Image (cartoon, rainbow, N blue to C red):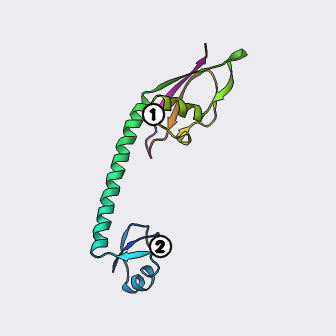
Amino acid sequence: MKVILTADVAALGTSGEMKTVADGYALNFLIPQKLAVPAAGGAYRAWQHDIASREDKRKREREEAEISANRIGGTTLTMGVKVGDGGKLYGSITAKDIADALARRGIQVDRHKIDLDEPLKSLGTYKVAIRVLAGMTPEVTIVVEPKG
């Protein structure tokens, strides 16, 4: 019997997958426990439509991510900071500061997606990777210079 899983089932599959299982397993366990529905008629057509809409959504997200990645890759942020003796910064530049600077340029980035191991604490030019999508990590150039 073909069923469409409505929840993740161990050793069978994840929600949204269509599986062929024994009639007894489907009728006595999966369907009564609301873990699956029979893949017949309207449920099957709805499943096909759901797969198509998920694929469209993935494609749209990928296109938006590519546009974002191109904008981020071509961006140079100049951060003016107060500097003490010997070129030491008062404070540091964190992922939040970078996210805020990108937001001012119209690029919305979650600060948790900025790969910054430690805050920037000295003058110079840095390349910081930003995770936009799986396998897509453009680098933004950050120039830290004295304010003035």
Residue in view at x 47 percent, y 37 percent? 108
Label 2 element class: loop
Judge left or right: residue 19 versus residue 126.
left
Q: Mark 1: which secondary structure?
A: loop
Q: Nearer the viewer, residue 45 or 21?
A: 45
Q: Which residue is mark 1?
A: 107
Residue 143 lies in the magenta stretch: yes
Residue 142, position in %: x, y?
A: 53, 25
Quadrant location of residue 54?
Answer: bottom left
At 64% from the left edge and 35% from the top edge, which residue is drawn? 118
Where in the figure is residue 110, as x and y percent of width and height? 52, 41
Give the tally of numbered discs. 2
Residue 124 placement (x, y as % from top left): 58, 21
Q: Which residues are magenta?
A: 133-146
Location of residue 63 with respect to 142 vertically, above or below = below
Q: Nearer the viewer, mark 1 or mark 2?
A: 1
| Amino acid marked by disc 2 | Ala
Q: Answer with left or right where residue 56 lies relative to residue 139.
A: left
Q: Counting residues from the N terminus, which is met first, the one under dot 1 or under dot 2?
A: 2
Q: Residue furthest top?
A: 148
- The three-letter code of the residue at mark 1 reads Ile
Vertical comparison of 104 with 2: above or below: above
Q: Which mark is residue 11?
A: 2
Q: In the rendered image, which quarter is residue 71 located in?
A: top left
Above or below — where is 41 with respect to 48? below
Image location (x, y in percent) of residue 46: 31, 67
**Picture residue at 32% right of the left edge, 61% below the top:** 51
